[in-house]
Image (cartoon, rainbow, N blue to C red):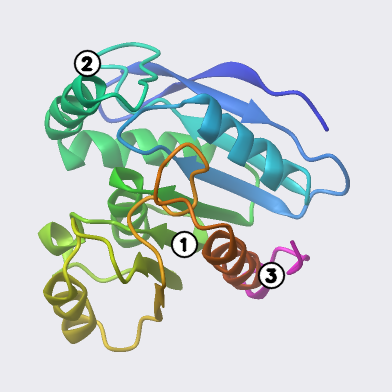
């Protein structure tokens, strides 16, 4: 597997420079992918996910979106780290995040896709609605999407939620579905964070199915592969 490295990106709107993890494809390039962090930052888990997408042909950039609050932030899963991560996420205005994500998209040759998890699931929705140059997007358990639910994605997007996710009740999902009945919403027999093998709600079957659906979406958007 190709090794990743750190690059620097610049938000054109405010000139802010920030880090990103970048990894090239192992084989023929199928497209670019902006992989958007959980509240925990660009952790080993996010890097491993980036590497796994590179293994099937994607050039991946995972931007460090809390660099304004804490450069290079990567938290553990202990309660105090979670509280700190929540504070950083709340101190990241969506307008700044939009510009940072646009910088990540712009550094990649098309077709460019986006996928994000937890806080990054909402940021993926944001990118689909506001950013230029995305061919498709896949959002995983984006709890804060209702803050942006009146905005309409510019590209195809699919949403993934766990049926037993206590932080995202059924009413939240219904609110999104009511506002955008044409957008596919997939529900899994899992809780929050089911893609991450670092979390107690990790569910490998749900993670594999969500990944397959994501790669199939990217295939339809111009990426050549649909298998895991």
- Can the viewer see residue 64? yes
Question: Quick check: 189 left or right of 126?
Answer: right
In the orientation shown, which residue stands out farthest toward the front? Answer: 200
Crowding at mark 3 (Cα within 10 Å: few <14, some 14-19, many 20+): some
Q: Which residue is mark 3?
A: 219
In the rendered structure, which disc, 2 or 3, sits on the residue that comes first in sequence? 2
Residue behind mark 2: 69
* Disc 3 to disc 1, C-alpha distance: 12 Å
Residue closer to the observer: 215 or 135: 215
- Seen from the viewer's position, the closer of residues 163 and 8 is 163
User: SS at mark 2?
Assistant: loop
- Mark before the other along the chain sequence, 2 or 1: 2
What is the number of the mark on residue 138? Answer: 1
Magenta includes 45? no
The x and y percentages for residue 141 are: 33, 58
Residue that appears at 40% across and 13% down: 72
Mark 3 residue element: helix
Image side of residue 81 versus residue 91, left or right: right
Where does the magenta region start and end? Answer: 219-228
Quarter occupied by the C terminus: bottom right
For the image shown, how many numbered marks are present on the structure? Answer: 3
């Amino acid at each position: 597997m190709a090794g990743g490295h750190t690059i620097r990106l610049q938000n054109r709107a405010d000139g802010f420079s920030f880090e990103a993890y970048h990894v090239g494809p192992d084989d023929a390039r199928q497209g670019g992918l902006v992989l958007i962090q959980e509240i925990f930052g660009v952790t080993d888990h996010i890097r491993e996910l980036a590497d796994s997408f590179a293994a099937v042909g994607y050039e991946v950039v995972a931007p460090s979106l809390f660099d304004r609050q804490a450069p290079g932030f990567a938290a553990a899963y202990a309660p105090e780290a979670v509280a700190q991560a929540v504070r950083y996420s709340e101190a990241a205005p969506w307008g700044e995040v939009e510009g940072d994500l646009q910088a990540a998209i712009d550094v990649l040759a098309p077709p460019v896709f986006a996928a994000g998890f937890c806080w990054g699931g909402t940021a993926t929705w944001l990118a689909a609605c506001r950013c230029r140059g995305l061919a498709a997007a896949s959002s995983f358990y984006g709890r804060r999407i209702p803050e942006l639910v009146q905005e309409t994605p510019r590209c195809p997007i699919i949403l993934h939620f766990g049926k037993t996710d206590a932080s995202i009740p059924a009413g939240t999902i219904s609110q999104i579905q009511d506002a955008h009945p044409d957008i596919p919403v997939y529900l899994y027999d899992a809780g929050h964070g089911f893609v991450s093998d670092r979390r107690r709600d990790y569910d490998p079957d749900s993670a594999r199915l969500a990944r397959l659906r994501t790669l199939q979406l990217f295939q339809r958007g111009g990426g050549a592969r649909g298998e895991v």
